[in-house]
Amino acid sequence: MRRTLFVILVSLVVVLGVAACGSDPTPTPTSVPSSSPLEKLIEEAKAASDHTIIAPLARYSPDLIRAHEAAFEEKFGIPVTIEIEPGHPTRDTPVKVMEGAPAGRAVVDQMNSMWIPGILPVLDGGYLQKPRWDALTEAWPDMKERRAATPDITAPDGSKLSDYCYYSGNVTWAIAYNTQYVTADEIKGLTWDSLTDPKWKGRFVVDVLMTGVEQFPFRAGWDVERMTTWVKAMKANGMLAVTGGSSGVLQALVSGEGHLGIAAYPSAVRQTAAGAPIALTYADFVPGIWNFICNPSITPHDTALANLFFGWFETDGALLREKLQKDGTNLLPGSVTTMGNRLTALGLTIDDLIGFRTREEAKILAEYQAAARAAFTE
């Protein structure tokens, strides 16, 4: 109010001065700088009556959640409370959003750890929200590169996946092993084919869904026939299939039920950070998925706060997690992560990463997975 009165008084003085000189009495409007898009977003988020964020972060420890809250408050001056949405972020969250959105029921404030098969029905149904990219790009200039790295997928209405989401990393499937039963020297130079050797009989563990394995046909020189032949050979060599995804595989390794197995890199390093006797390496090529984070069309809490947290979570938040747990997966040029360093140390490059980035490849992936599971169960 005082600033407004001051501007008015200054304007009047100028007008009177000009009039006294006999010049044109029409005043020149006073220019008052407006807030930038980022400043406006922060102001709106601060003004929210509820500073709660619901996100599918069940895999994060309470200490890590508190670290996120503290770091976000330190950067923006907004005390935030993170509540956990149960279930698997990649598989369960999209289904919940699809079930709730048509009825106007919000489920989560952000959809992290997304992948193409899970997000396609949400995208096609129109249940994603366009974030305030101008503000987020002001805060994190590399947001342009992150959006460009998001899989180039078009929705039925002509919009792009990158209109709603941004790249968060490449989640790779590593070979995790229990250091009480396997040494680093034993697995040096490991290849997928070498796992059929009798020395690994009854020791290798996979997820029953053949997660990671189903991507083998994307590798040059592999096809469905070679993948199914590998699965059958591994079954004959005593390969164990467990439920629970990477968590189930890692539990089997920690218990000694198996000695090594295929698991998502972030899950494996979290086990290591928690003190489990788990180490990891990579074979001759690396299955993985392009991960991205998205904004649902409706959020249970303040939209401005959800937008700001959405932008922070896979930028500054990812740097925080890399610092605390070494589980960063960002492989964009210029990024430095422990995972990227591991790949480089093994002589692996971006050309050794296999995966899927299109609708067509996601559809084919389901066929590959069915073939791999059938080869194991027949």
Image (cartoon, helix red, strand yellow):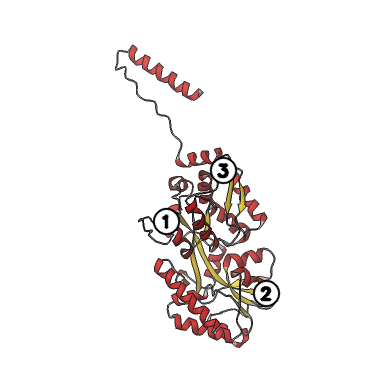
Q: CA distance from mark 2 to mark 1?
A: 41 Å
**Which of the two discs, 2 and 1, sits closer to the camera?**
1
Label 1 neighbour load within 10 Å: few <14, some 14-19, many 20+: many
Instruction: Report which residue position mark 2 lands on.
Output: 179
Amino acid beneath label 3: Phe
Taking the spot 43% from the left edge, 66% from the top edge, the residue there is 357
Instruction: Report which residue position mark 3 lands on.
Output: 76
Q: Position of residue 168 (x, y in %)?
A: 50, 58
* Image quadrant in which you'd find residue 240: bottom right
Pointers 3 and 2 in contact (C-beta within 8 Å): no
Whether residue 102 is situated above or below residue 254 in the rendered picture? above
Sooner in the amino-acid sequence: mark 2 or mark 1: 1
Whether residue 362 is situated above or below residue 195 in the rendered picture? above
Q: CA distance from mark 3 to mark 1?
A: 25 Å
Amino acid beneath label 2: Thr
Sooner in the amino-acid sequence: mark 3 or mark 1: 3
Q: Is residue 332 visible?
A: no
Look at the numbered disc 1 and give the secondary structure of its residue: helix
Look at the numbered disc 2 and give the secondary structure of its residue: loop
Q: Is residue 240 visible?
A: yes
Q: Position of residue 39 (x, y in %)?
A: 49, 39
Whether residue 228 is situated above or below residue 311 in the rendered picture? below
- Of residues 128 and 20, the one nearer the viewer is 128
**Which of the two discs, 3 and 1, sits closer to the camera?**
1
The quadrant of the picture occupied by the C terminus is bottom right
Instruction: Report which residue position mark 1 lands on.
Output: 162
19 sits left or right of 275 in the view? left
Q: Position of residue 59 (x, y in %)?
A: 62, 61
Q: CA distance from mark 3 to mark 2?
A: 42 Å
